[in-house]
Amino acid sequence: MALMPQTGYLHSAYQVTDIDEVAASGEYLRERGYRHAWGLGRHIQGSQIFDYWRDPDRAMFEHYTDGDVFDAAMEPGWAPMSVSGLAQWGPKATAEFTGANDPRVVVAAIKALREKGNEVDLAALRGLIKAMSS
């Protein structure tokens, strides 16, 4: 969960068998007009190998494998969020992934600043900009 200027669908994630299937599913999506958003890489939180894609309507999908598995013995916690802290290895997160190239994100942030009672203020907006460009 992350503080964002608007609520809504971020992405769907689908677990696949192994890294070969992550790569093959990307090729399948590319052949059908999906745009590559980010990956291949390995997340820090969860440790899974990932690849992100956007469909023609800009909905985002993740294929992943080899993620950590937890049970009730694992204590929940918080981790700082930054784009540079999203992956152990792989390419730098793209503007396609973060939404930094989507004018709708900017418009939503400006509208959120006007609304009373939400958690997005100028300081939060600065933090979002910093996280998206780190």
Image (tube, rainbow, N blue to C red):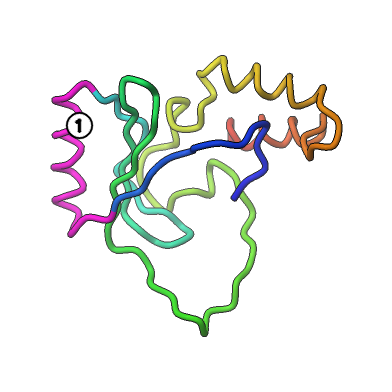
Label 1 belongs to which residue? 29
**Residue 126 counted in the magenta span:** no
39 shown above or below 106: below
Q: Residue 16's quadrant in the figure? A: bottom left
Quarter that holds the C terminus: top right
112 versus 124 height, above or below: above
Is 11 left or right of 35, judged from the image as shown? right
Type of amino acid under label 1: Leu
Give coordinates of residue 126: x percent, y percent.
75, 31
Left of 72 or right of it: where is 67?
left
Q: Where residue 20 appears, x then y in whole percent? A: 14, 51
Under circle 1, the secondary element is helix
Q: In the rendered view, does 34 fall on the left or right side of 100?
A: left
* x 45%, y 79%: residue: 71
Residue sitting at x 31%, y 20%: 56
Q: Residue at x 14, y 34 (%)?
A: 28
Find residue 44 and report its horizontal and vertical position in percent. 46, 57
Predominant SS along the magenta part: helix
Residue 78 left/right relative to 52: right
Measuring 50% from the left and 32% from the top, which residue is drawn there? 98
Quarter of the image where one finds residue 36: top left
Relative to 120, say whether 46 is above or below: below
Q: Give the extent of the magenta segment.
A: 15-33
- From this viewpoint, which residue is outermost toward the bottom? 73
Q: Is residue 21 found inside the magenta-colored segment of the image?
A: yes
